Image (cartoon, helix red, strand yellow):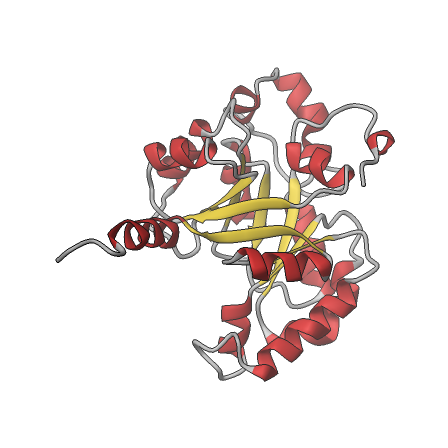
């Protein structure tokens, strides 16, 4: 159902517009340090990409090129950083990321730190230095400084069973925009590495979902099929990662080879 009155002025971050209208965003985790790959992803119907600086072989220079390649396209660039300290978010934001995903958010304090790292004072502790972000966003420096706090997404990733006892408090952290549940890391933290479909892992995920239900935070997760995505949408998910760049490439090649004579 559309709610056009929910946002009087369209946001620069189109994910915020999409969610204000009650929609669901679809994205990909980008692990390949390639401008060309981003150009393809940006015109493939996706809403966002998460540049993976936690597990992918992507340094800051490569990340800058990838973020810049999304400029002027429908693809919203987010960055997943490798640690929970505020400095991990500093350069990704300054080179144009529209949101930062922090790993291993296990407590209310962790969630508050996510918000502080992505907001300028007095709302947070972000330092000044956005030399390239305004260029990527297509606005002036003064416009960027006045709008960054309302455009940038503060994103927490729940991927440890240790976060379960604090999830309700995490979801109600002022300024937190989006929470992703990471099923594979969650399974690993439960001693079930490689088995996110295990009933115990799924039960834990259901508890996470229940605790987040009713909060203002957007719920995100991973859906690798339309059937799974539809089921998750019914459970309140509004941001769905449909795969990694490498896995989508692999799936495409496998599909192309299916039935070919050997």
Is residue 222 something that shows in the picture?
A: no
Name the foreground residue: 229 vs 92: 229
Picture layout, residue 95 above or below residue 262? above
Image quadrant assignment for residue 140? top right
246 left or right of 261 in image: right
Q: Tally the numbered discs.
A: 0
Residue at position x 36%, y 44% in the image: 59
Q: Name the residue at the top extreme.
A: 140
* Residue 195 in sight: yes
Image coords of residue 58 (percent x, y): 36, 46
Give percent across and percent down for residue 257: 24, 53
Above/below status of 111 relative to 50: below
| Residue at the far left in the pictured view | 262
- Residue 10 image point, x, y percent: 74, 25
Give the residue at the far right of this rendering: 5
Query: At 72% across and 24% down in the image, what residue appears?
Result: 146
Q: With respect to residue 210, does 69 lie above or below?
A: above
Residue at (37, 52) in percent of width and height? 56
Report the residue at 35% width, 33% height from top: 35
Q: Nearer the viewer, residue 218 or 112?
A: 218
Q: The N terminus appears in which quarter of the rendering?
A: top right
Work out whether 141 lies above or below 38: above
Residue 206: which quarter of the image? Answer: bottom right
Tell me where residue 236 appears, x and y as whole percent: 73, 58
């Amino acid at each position: 159902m559309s709610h056009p009155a929910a946002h009087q002025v369209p946001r620069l971050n189109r994910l915020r517009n999409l969610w204000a209208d009650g929609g669901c965003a679809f994205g990909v985790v980008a692990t390949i340090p390639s401008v060309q790959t981003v150009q393809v992803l940006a015109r493939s119907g996706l809403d966002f990409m998460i540049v993976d600086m936690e597990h992918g072989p992507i340094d800051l220079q490569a990340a800058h090129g990838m973020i810049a390649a999304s400029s002027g396209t429908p693809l919203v660039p987010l960055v997943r950083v490798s640690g929970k300290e505020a400095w991990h978010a500093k350069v990704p934001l300054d080179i144009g990321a529209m949101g930062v995903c922090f790993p291993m958010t296990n407590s209310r304090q962790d969630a508050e730190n996510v918000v502080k790292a992505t907001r300028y004072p007095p709302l947070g502790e972000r330092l000044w230095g956005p030399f390239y972000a305004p260029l990527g966003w297509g606005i002036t420096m003064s416009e960027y400084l006045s709008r960054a706090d309302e455009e940038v997404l503060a994103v927490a990733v729940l991927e440890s069973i240790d976060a379960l006892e604090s999830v309700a408090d995490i979801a109600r952290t002022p300024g937190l925009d989006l929470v992703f549940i990471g099923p594979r890391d969650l399974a690993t933290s439960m001693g079930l590495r490689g088995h996110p479909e295990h009933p115990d892992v799924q039960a834990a995920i259901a508890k996470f979902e229940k605790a987040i239900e009713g909060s203002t935070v957007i719920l995100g997760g991973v859906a690798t099929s339309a059937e799974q995505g539809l089921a998750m949408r019914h459970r309140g998910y509004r941001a769905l990662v449909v795969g990694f760049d490498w896995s989508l490439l692999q799936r495409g090649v496998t599909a192309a080879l299916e039935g070919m004579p050997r």
